[in-house]
Every structure is written in structure tokens, then in C-alpha cells.
Image (tube, coloured by chain):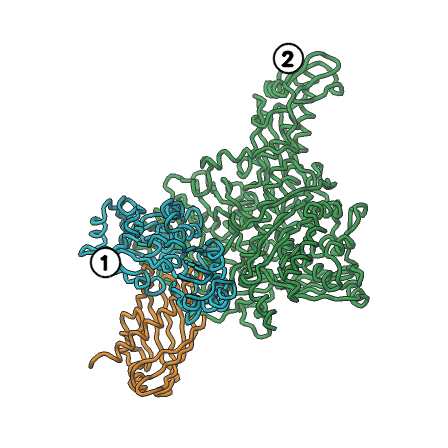
Chain colours: A green, B cyan, C orange
Amino acid sequence: MATTTTAPKLKTHVGERIRRTEDPRLITGTACYLDDITRPGMLHAAVLRSPYAAARINSISIEDALALPGVKAVYVGKDVESVGGVPCAGSMPDLRIPNHKILAGDRVYYVGHPVAAVVATDKYIAADAIERIEVDYEPTELVSDPEEALQEGAVKVHPEYPDNVAFTFSQEGGDVEEAFRQADVIVKEKILVPRLAPLPIETRGVVAEYDEGAQELTIYSSTQIPHLLRTQLALQLNLPEHHVRVIAPEVGGGFGSKCNVWAEEALAAFVAMELKQPVKWVESRRESILVVAHGRAHVDTLELAAKNDGTLLGLKLHILCDIGAHHQLLTPIIPTLAVLMLPGLYKFRSFKADLIGAFTNRAPSDLYRGAGRPEATYVIERMVDKLAAEIGMDPAEIRFKNFPASTDFPFNSATGLQYDSGDYATAFNKALDIVDYKARRAEQEAARAEGRLYGIGISTYGEICAFGPSPATPAGGWESASVNVEATGKVAVMTGISPHGQGEETSFAQLTADALGIPMDDIVVVHGDTAKVHYGIGTFGSRGISIGGSALHLALQDVVAKATKYAAHMMGVDAETVTFEGGVFSSEATDSTLTLADVALEAHLCRQLPPGTEPGLAATRFFEPSNFAFPFGAHICVTEVDKETGEVDIQRFVAVDDCGRIINPLLVEGQIHGGIAQGLGPAFQEGVIYDDEGQLLNGTLMDYSIPKARNMPWIETDRTETPSPVNPLGTKGVGEAGTIGSLPAFVNSVVDALSPLGIEHIDIPMTSQSIWNAIHERSRT
Amino acid sequence: MIPASFDYSAPETLSEALQLLGDEEAKVLAGGQSLIPMLKLRLAQPARLVDLDRIPDLNFIAEDNGTIRIGAMTTHHQVESSDLLAENCPLLAKTAAHIGDVQVRNRGTIGGSVAHADPAADYPAALLALEAQVKLVSASGERVVALDEFLVDALTTSLEDGEILTEVHVPVEQAGVATAYRTLIQPASGFAIVGAAVRLGVSNGNVSFVRVALTGVGSKPYRASAVEQALEGGPANAEAFAAAAAHAAEDVDVLSDIHASAAYRASLAAVQTRRALEDAAGSA
Amino acid sequence: MTLKGTYSLPARRQKVWDALLDPGVLARTLPGCKSLEAVGPDEYRMHMALAISSLKGVFEGKVRIEDQQPPESYRLTVQGRGKIGFVNGGGSFRLRESEDAVTEIEYQGDVKAGGTIASVGQRLMNMTSKMMIKRFFTALEKELTAPV
């Protein structure tokens, strides 16, 4: 039945600063996070962890713990031997993967290694019972420092291997030796990139429930990858995957730390199946800092060859990555990303990189926001600055000189990547204009004349994201999306990505609202439940909008095509004459119009559909990009260092980012701001400290310092928009850009400030103490 | 991060609190900004907490004959925003504004902080410079003790079992005395790596009155008498301040930890003392 | 963490030496020592309950006296384990009699902690270690100067 009502003209949503539809439930406390979940008869688990970095376990006495009223069970390593180990997706030929049991066997390998689990009727009893477990540890020799781990005769973390090499990886492009022969100048530096605790505001947690009748295991986990977790849990527990359902409830941040498969997830599942009662485990903040795979953990040695005119010729890099005692899901893969992105935005002609992953008696390391790219960007941006200083060239000029031109794209990097699109000079010029670079240099000169330490730090960064083509990713690089226009005309979007703060419930609704001409309020974006959405890969590597959003884009196109066909049939006109705009179908061949809701209802009533049509108005599509996307940008930081105290005053911070086409500028700015905070942290405050006994020394937020509001500079943001050709939306991704781009700007600024003292490099975190040390040592000599 | 179990009492009068404190394993809760984390880490496992939060008589700021009395349960925020203190003891108010963050200042109390005796707490620097006293009450009586004597060592005071710190006493600031507090904080905890509090009176270009106290440097906050002696009666100028401030960590066994070496702390002690002297001189 | 320092005791060196190696005196002077029981020559099992303000730690441990050069020097190692982690310390003590009947003890040692205390207590480690040493020497001084 055709109607003649005209839907109100709806404004477009894409490109608008639309507030997050997620926020009302988050800020009113009505969202359901993992620890908000209760199930009938639910038990609570707590995990006992090793205080030793290396020890043999002679015996474990659990009687006292079991005797505590309310304690249901205590599990040690031998009880859970049937459960498969924690998986690792690495695939280098020489990769060594020691058996990563979910509870320690007869040895512990790092402080925090899970040794036993208590299950009790409440979490307080579980915590008390943990203290009643007696473990007879026999401490053994250990190695904590990654450089020591690779020395001849070092203590072996895993005695079954001949040394502590976990894997190696090499890559070479061009003739690097020739480049070094031709060089006028070679600069070298050893740069430490310390371990960082990912510190999501919500720690990890899992609730496991087993329905014995249906043989169905339901896992609620604070995860970024519900489907991948389902597959891995099915393998670990030897269950058919269709009997495992994974639900990611509201997830309070991940920063990559929840893009993993954790021992505690399988442990909770095992316990729920054993006891036939639901069980919850929620990680404490202390556990989170201690054992949630730390990011970075590099010792990098670089050599850069160049001409006196600033032309970059070749780069040699040696990465030593401290992987800890065991692999987590992506441990060996992350540092290879650093190798791939090491040429940064520059036209290097040659390149040679060697990477060694070293076992140490420390907690595993793995991905953390930026994952490999912050390490790469930091070291190359430091080296370019060092070269500029060495040859007396302005650090801005040397960058312009080595950028590929905007007409050079797609641009093949020295490491064999093909950068999709870019216009580096335009973004950089914009940042220089905003900060008024010439005026700042003049101000610097005046400051230096007064003996003040004033610095201007530049970072022109590039990153690889929107993971990615499947052959180049460990777990499938595609994504799924389904659109279902319900009989009432409301729309459900189901996506395989699993947002945990990125705001895709909003941006996906924007895409849908524009494609279907309906208000955002009529759209729900469903994610994070393997029983509700089609298999997907998840949210990490700045892939949500580019891959998940593109799949949605395709599904929306299918729905519109279907609906147009039905509308034409309903109006009795040729489909070619039907246009769809603002949610209304019309045709030059008739005066009547139809809304999407009219068509959706008919699609469900099936009274006048074209012959052979299946009912409903829905579509499911998949998208896999032909290449990664390569966002870029320029960050500039102006600082003044207090010579006497080592404190740094950040006077300006300018961030011009290009993440391709933008769906929601508000979300993009939010990501940039948060990202910059996580570049500021490692620059000035953060870094896990281990002593030579493998003890983690700053294990609380009283000692591990993350940025607070008072530490944040005012951020001046702007952007350029260079669409990506590798996906239909033209987006590139922005989840990690701020973290990747900002760190080198902070460090280059401080080093620039300190350079009149002859200081050429300072390792991060640049605490007031370490800056004072650097100044003090100089003034002494 | 779950404490061991304990009993909890929230008496509404001081005498009730004193009675409850008779339990050997009882511990006073006075804001909890240091104690609660210790409980959660199970580094402290008292059998009972006696929460003073509901005793209205312990929350006040009053002036009486040139002495300002501050109830133990007065929060840092109340100290920071008190008109009476802004007018009559500005050093204490401005020091309170440096403590922790907004949340800590809303919960933490002056009595809790002083009795906990954290060697890097902000208050003791100001309070020592002010020659403050503390009132200690027990079931058998009360005594007023100079803060200097009250603070024995890191986390150690002369508070006896069964005693409660009920008041902090500071003098109304003298006319012509300007004050300043300078601190450099450890960014994670917000505690001072070094904090320097100064009271300075200048007449005819010379120092007529000076009190300097530091926190964070050694295992207990202290009056920097060497600095005071170097300044007393001498010129109030930059050179004199710098020369005197160089004595700020003299004879102090300077702390060293993962956040700040002893050398850095000692250097900061001199710098912050000098700057606080300059601030005070500049505001006089 | 390295600790070093000196402490002067108003007693002759031999008397100080005897006291330092007397398990009875050790039991009374080692901070928090609740019991000390010999398990071998110069080796003892110790039960310790350390308390600083509201902080409390119960440790079971071993004390060993090594490298004795009477009455000049020796080495003391203490190992303790408890629910909040473990502490291992070792240090050398050197005794010198200066003026009449004053003995100066020079000590130098390392303290290493593990588990909870290591990862949450760094801010307090340095000051509490110093305090423990001070408590030890203060108690020792009391022993030495107590009327017999």
C-alpha cells in the first residue's frame, strides 16, 4: 500500500560532531560492566601468584584454604592439566613457544605467575583463602634484564632451550652497506623503550557459566575479541565452538590488553564446568599492573646514514624485545610491526633490521596502544632529529626534504609496505603554521640568550592500521556486518567488531542513518555477543571504522538495493526510475512515495513482493581491504625545562592528524586527546621498573605514574583529510595516532631544550629526576 | 585488593571513641587516605577500625587568643578554603591546597595526616614552620605536645596506645610575616619529593623573622635551623637566600627511592627553599 | 637497596662483639624478633612480627652469622618470608674501638624484597630499612648499657 506522506528531510550525520550515544548509560552508571554481572549461585575466584621470578614449586598445601568456611575448591597446576595452554599466534620459523600452562606446573617463571586458584562463595572469603595456601618455593637462578639474557652463559629462563632467544626476525631492503659507504654522515644511538602497563580503567574480568543440559558454556569477558576468544577457548577446553558463547559486556577500556586470550578465561571456564556453578573472577589493580602484558619493552640500536644535505640513505636497526617468560597471543608479532614502520614517512633507499625476542624472568609483554608503531616512530623521529643536529639543519627542513611528494602515492616504503595515500607536507605545514614555527625559533633564540632551556620538538609520524588484508594478519583481516530493517522500520546493525570506548555505536549509527534516511534513534548497533552477531575479528589496530564500517557500508548498500526493488514493485514502476533519499522512495513515474518503514513492513508481510523474493529486509556483508591504511600527521611540542629542578613546562602542543575521511570529528578528537595522554605518560612518567631479581617495583598507582588531568597540556588540534583508496569509506583509523605521534614530539622538544648543554639524547621516561641527572652530569663535566 | 576482615565502629562522641580504642588491635580511621590502601594491600590488618568521621566535635576551625585550633577531622579542603585561615594563617591554607588531589582533599583530614606521620606529607612542613602543637587525648587525660616532639621518625609518633590526636594548634600569623610553600611532587602519589615551607619577616631590608621547614627529604620532616640561622638578622636578598638555602639538607640522612635519589632530593631541598624564600619576600 | 652507616656504642669492642653474637641478645634486639631458635652453628630460625605504625608484617625466617673475624668483623644474613612477600638482607659489620670504651660499628649491606612489599612498598623501603637499623642499634645500646 503506497502512501503519499513525505518524510521530513533529514540532515546528514556523517561528518558531524555528534555526541556519543553510548554516554548516557555510562555517565549515569546504568551500563553493565563485567563486575556488575551476577548469576544465580555464582561463586568467586581469586588467583594466588608467585612472589618469585624463578622458583621450583616443591609442594603446595591447600588444606588450610579448603578448611575455611565458604571455600568450594582450590585448584593447582596438576588439576587443570587437561586445559590447553595460553595460545600464541606467532609463526616465525625459529619461534620457541614454551608450554604456557594456565596454572604453573612445577616451576614459576615470573613474579605474578598464577600458581593456584581458590573458588569461594564470596570474593572476601576467596581473598582470605588465598593467604592460607602454603607454597614451598625453592628460588632458582634467574635473569631479569633482556640484554643479560642474551649474553653467553646467561641463566636460562626455560632450561629446555639452549639459550634465551624466543625468536628472530630480519628484514632488508635496498643495498644498505652501499648506502653506508656513500654516507657523508652516520649517526648512532641506543634507545630504550621501557615496558608500559596498559592500565585500562576497568581491569580484566570473566564470568563463566555452564548449562549442563544444553552443554553450553557462556563466557562473559572484558575482551576486545569475543569471537577469537570463543575459538581459542573451544580449542583449549576441547569443546565444539557452537557450545561456547562469548559475551563482551560494557568494556571499560583495553588499549590492546584485552586483545588477548588469558589464562584466567580458560581457568574460569574450567571451574564453572567442574563445579557446575557460575564463577566470577575480577582482576585487582595490583594484578593488572603486575601481569597484564606490558607494552613496548625494547632496547633499540640504530644507525642512520645520510648525505650532508640531509638526504636519508640507509638505516640499520637492531631491536631487542624483552618478551618476558611466556608468549601471549601476539607477543612475537608486535615488534615486527616496529620493523615494518621504522622508515616512518621518509624515502629511505635501504634498510636492514634484525629483531631478537629474548626470554626473561618477567611478565609477558604484548600489544599496547600503538603496538609496534610508537616504538618505530619514536626511534626514527629521534634519529632524524639527531641527524639534523649533527649536520646543523633545521629539523623541519630535513623532514620536508625526505617526504615522498603527494604525487608519489601509493608509495613503496623501504620495508616493502605500500603506503596508500598521503600528503605529508600539507599536514606538516599546517602544524608549523599553527605553532608559528619561525616565531617559536626566534623565541628560543631569545630564551637561550638568557640561559633558559626552551625546546621545540617535531614529530612527523605515520602509522599502519585498519588491519588488514588477511594474508598479512594472524587471525583474519576481514570484518562482518549485518543490517536488519525490522517490520516496524527500526534498524538493528550487527557488527563483528567489539568497541570498548571507541564510540562505534555512534559512528555506525551515523553511517546507517545517512544510508537509510532514518534518525539515529531508530538504530541500534549490536556487538560483543557471539550469539547475536556474525563471526567477526574484533576491535584493535584502529580497524573498527575502516574494516567494520566498510562491511556495514556494503550491507547498507545491499539493503537499499533490495528495498528499492521492493518499493518499485509496490509502486508498480520500474526499479530504475526509483530514487531513495531522506528515507523516502519516489519515482518520476508516479506521484506516490514510500518510506523505508512502509517497505520494511511489506518485506515482512510478503503480500506484494516481487515473485521469488525471500522475506525480510536484511543483508550481511563482509569486507576485507586490499591493503592497510596509513594515517599520518605532525605533532609539535614547545617546552621549557627548569634547569634547577628538571621539571618540564609544556607550553604548546599542536596536533595535526590525517586519518582519512572523518565520520565524526568529535570522536576523532577524543581519540587524539586520549592518545596524546598515552604518549605523554611514557614521555615523562610511565615505565614499569624491574629490579635484577625480577621484582616489579612500581606495582601500584602510588608508584606507577600515569598522566592526570593536571599533567595534560592544552592540545591544539587540526586535521587534513586524505581519503584512503583501500576501503569504500576512505577512512584510515585514529585509535592509536595520538599515542604514536606525540611521544617523539615531547622527547624531541626536551632534547632540543637541553641541546645547548651538549645533551643529544635522553631516555624515557624523562622524569624530573632523569632530566636533572642529565643536566647535572653535564654541568659537572 | 581486599582487606582482611575487621570490625568497624563509628562512634559519635570522643569518649566513646576512646573507649573503643581500648582494644589492643584497634586503629583510628580519620579520612583513610593512607590507611585504606594499606588495609587493601593487607599490609595493615587491624582487628577494629574506629572511624572518627561522625564525631562533630572534631571538625572545626576556631581562633582563641592568638591560637588557632583545628579539629582533627577537619578535611584538607576545609583548611584550604577556610576564610579564617586565609586571613590568619595563610601558610597552612596554601599548603593544604597542594595535598594530593581534589578527592584526597575532600576525604583526608589534618589529624589523620599528622598522626600518620608520612615523611613526605605536605602538612608537617608548614606546621613545623608554624611551631604547631598537637592535642592528644586519652581516657586518663590530655596533653599538648609540640609537633617537633610528636614526630619521632617515619610513620612513628609519640602517640600512646589509647590516645587520639584531637586538635592541631597554630599561631595567628604575625603582622609583617609573609609565607610560602614550594613543592615538587612525585607524580604518581602526589606526595612531596621535597616541600619547603617558609615564614619570613623583613624589616629595613633585613630578615627579622624566619622559619623554614622541609618535608620529603629525610625520614621525618624537620626545621631547617641552619638555614634560619644563616638568614636571621642578615640581608633579605637573593644572594643571602641562595647562600642560606644551600644548608637546607645539612646533617640530614637524605632518603633515596625509585623516584628520587638522595642527591636529587638534597639539591631540590636547596632550590625549593630558596624559591620559597623568594616567593615569601616577593609577597611581603 | 644498599644501606650503610656507622653507629657508636658506649662499650668496649669485645663486649659489643659478644653481645652481637649472643643469640639471647639478638632475639631481644633484632626488630620484631619474637623467637630465635638455633638450628645449626651460627644459624637460627626466627619468627618476626615487624610493625611500623599500622603496617604489620609477620615473617618466618633464617638468621645466619658468617665470616667471623672476632672481634673485628662478621657478616649477618637474614631471610624472611611472609604473606606479604619476602625480605632478604645481608650485611657486613666492622667493629672499631675508638676512644676509651666506645666502639664504632660500621655496617654495609643490601636489602632485597619480593612479592607485595617489593611492588607496593618502594616509597617506604628506604625509610623503614633505616628505621629497622636504628631500632636494632638502639636496642643493642640498651642491652650494653643496662645495669647488670
Name the residue type under label 1: Arg
Q: Is residue B162 visible?
A: yes
For disc 2, the marked residue is A3
Number of marks in picture: 2
> CA–CA distance between discs 1 and 2?
90 Å
For this view, does C52 lie left or right of residue A138? left
Q: Chain of mark 2?
A: A
Say which mark, if any, is on residue A320.
none
User: In percent of the image, x 62 and y 62: which residue is there?
Assistant: A167
At which x and y percent is residue B148?
33, 63
| Secondary element at tag 2 | loop
For this view, does A170 lie left or right of residue A143? right
User: In percent of the image, x 54 and y 70: which residue is there?
Assistant: A156
Q: Is residue C145 above or below residue A533?
A: below
Picture quadrant where residue A12 is located: top right
| Secondary element at tag 1 | strand
The residue positioned farthest toward the front in the image shown: B204
Q: Is residue A723 above or below residue C123?
A: above
Q: Is residue A761 above or below residue B101?
A: below
Q: Are marks 1 and 2 in contact (CB under 8 Å)?
A: no
* Same chain, labels 1 and 2: no
Q: Nearer the viewer, residue A697 or A210?
A: A697
At which x and y percent is residue A314?
76, 62
For disc 1, the marked residue is B143
Picture quadrant where residue C12 is located: bottom left
Q: Nearer the viewer, residue A46 or A512?
A: A512
* Callout 1 crowding tier (Cα within 10 Å): few <14, some 14–19, many ≥20: few
At which x and y percent is residue A746?
62, 55
Name the residue type under label 2: Thr
